[in-house]
Image (cartoon, grey):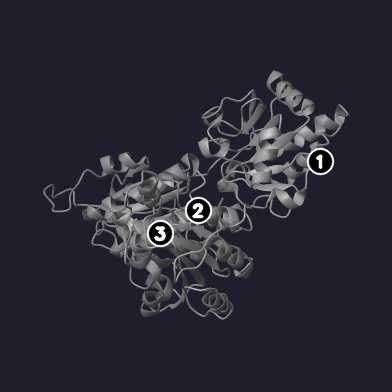
Amino acid sequence: MYDDAQPAQAPAKTHVHQAIAQAVRDHGIDRLFGLMGDANLFIADHFARACGGRFIPAAHEGSSVLMALAWAHVTGRVGVATITHGPALTNCVTALTEGVRGQIPMVLLAGDTPVSNPRHLQGINQREVVAATGAGFEQLRSPDTVARDVARAMYRAQVERRPVVLNMPADFMWQEARYARHVLSVFETRSYVPEGDALDQALGMVASARRPVILAGSGASGARAQILRLAERLEAPVATTLKAKGLFRGHPYDMDIFGTLSTPAAYDVIAKSDCILCFGAGLHDFTTDRGKLTEGKRLVQIDTDPRAIGRSVHPDAALVADAGLTADNFVHWLDEAEIPASGFTPELDPQTLRAHAPAPKGAVAEGCIKYVPALEQLEQALPQDRILVSDGGRFMTEVWCRISAPDPRSFVNTANFGSIGLGMPEAIGAAIAAPDRPVVLFSGDGGFMMGGLTEFNTAVRLKQDLIVILCNDSAYGAEHIQFLDRQMDPALTEFDWPCFADVATSLGGRGVLVRSEADLQKALAAIEVRDRPLLIELRLDPHDVPRMRM
């Protein structure tokens, strides 16, 4: 599971803070995100100075968790962060919930107030705080169980696919402990397709379909080649959930995102289909357009997690099985039975499948630029090998639809909990995970004021190749629309923010303000010559930004 080329093992007797740092390093973790306090500062110091790791300091505790989540998503490994106790942990509630909803494995080394001081100013029931987020909880039991407790937290994070908090009493840190390396194996046997009625039923539905469509979610992100082989055998178009964005990029019959985020042509194709073959996707309301896209057609669902089967829409046939192996198995039996291809894709026009509706007509307020045309130009000008990160807000669904990502690991969605302000920390974590690639963050003005300002200078200090596209309509957009829909004054949702481009420059980056087409061309040119974190502020008319496609 991990590279065995580790630093020399810690001495038989060591201090607890040293043992914790070494135990993390023994799991192949060489990046530790965090914010130091009196319960964890010596862990971070020993990890960096004696264990050969790198400590990445955040400006806010929640940011350290978000950085670790993005690092885990991009690398496919367990992210690790560390904070101190009390308010440090409560500052992480949103970030931990985001990780739980996103099913991302990470471990948070959280200090706790001394056991010997139950009236400590920062004392709180940390187990109950963690339970409210849905994250797992492990207690550091004693100085001599450090290696086993860290290993248990790492193991649980992987098999449960969620954040796990390791709770560490501060008064343990300078106690002596006996230490021996301890790493738990993670057993990842792929689930084979069983023989029997379930397989026969699924195959029968697929073989008889005349207009089949294949949908893949993040649970099938490792099965691109096998699923495309099946799609070509069936002559079926392919699409993905939002989280698997980019999985089929480059294929002529890739419809991109399935559901409320589909193009008009793709939505029409899905609506006309008679069978949806779904691999590793949860089928929530936005994917199915609240069930409209699954009505009147057969649904075959394949997932390694039996809990995902029928969670939202009950399928007509289902297999608890590996996506790639199942796709290969389907091709084998279709060939054995000499089932002809459906003939569906030859009826389709590949040029229209990924074409979204044109920009809304009409003028914009003075000093603003039209949003959708600006996105279309940015899609062409931004580096093609980018990692795309999206913060939350009204702007985001147009970004998801119109800005491409190379593959699912190169797309970081921070809206699993519906929060705003999480994008900048996750962009930093993604950049640490892939230091040789540019990271592009799209953020709204409200989200940037909430979480972006706090960490933009962190990206500057780390000298990251980061491009921030700030979509500034000087309003809380979703709320702005609700007031307008009820013929009410939206003034309370509108803000006179500072110039974010100037703020970015003052924080050590480079800011470019875009209020016209000429300004946009200057901003696009700045992308080519960037030498520090670059922030492009798009001044937008709140009446021009389209509604969220949800």
Q: Amino acid at mark 3?
A: Gln
Inspect this view and state whether residue 112 appears.
yes
Residue 43 placement: quadrant: bottom left
Judged from the image, the secondary structure of the residue bearing numbered disc 1 is: helix
- Sequence-first disc among 2 and 1: 1
Where is mark 1, residue-wise? 347
* Label 2: how many Cα within 10 Å (few below 14, some 14–19, many 20+): some
Q: Residue at x 55, y 33 (%)?
A: 305
Q: Nearer the viewer, residue 132 or 46?
A: 132
Q: Measure the alpha-carbon separation of dots 3 and 2.
A: 50 Å
Inter-mark Cα distance, 1 to 3: 60 Å
Q: Give the amino acid type for the residue marked by disc 1 in the picture.
A: Glu
Horizontally, residue 492 falls left or right of residue 309, namely left
103 horizontally vs 451: left or right: right
Between discs 1 and 3, the one toward the N terminus? 3
Label disc, if present, on residue 22 of the rendered structure:
3
Task: For marks 2 and 1, give the CA distance.
Answer: 31 Å
Q: State the mark number for residue 546.
A: 2
User: Residue 356: where, in percent of width, then height?
Assistant: 63, 52
Whether pointer 1 and pointer 3 mark residues with C-beta atoms closer than 8 Å, the reply is: no
Nearer the observer, disc 2 or disc 1? 2
Q: Name the foreground residue: 355 vs 315.
A: 355
Label 3 vs 2, first from the N-terminus: 3
Q: What is the three-letter code of the residue carrying label 2?
A: Pro
Q: Quadrant of residue 101?
A: top left
Judged by depth in the image, the label closer to the viewer, 1 or 3, is: 1
Give percent across and percent down for residue 210: 78, 30
Taking the spot 25% from the left edge, 45% from the top edge, the residue there is: 126
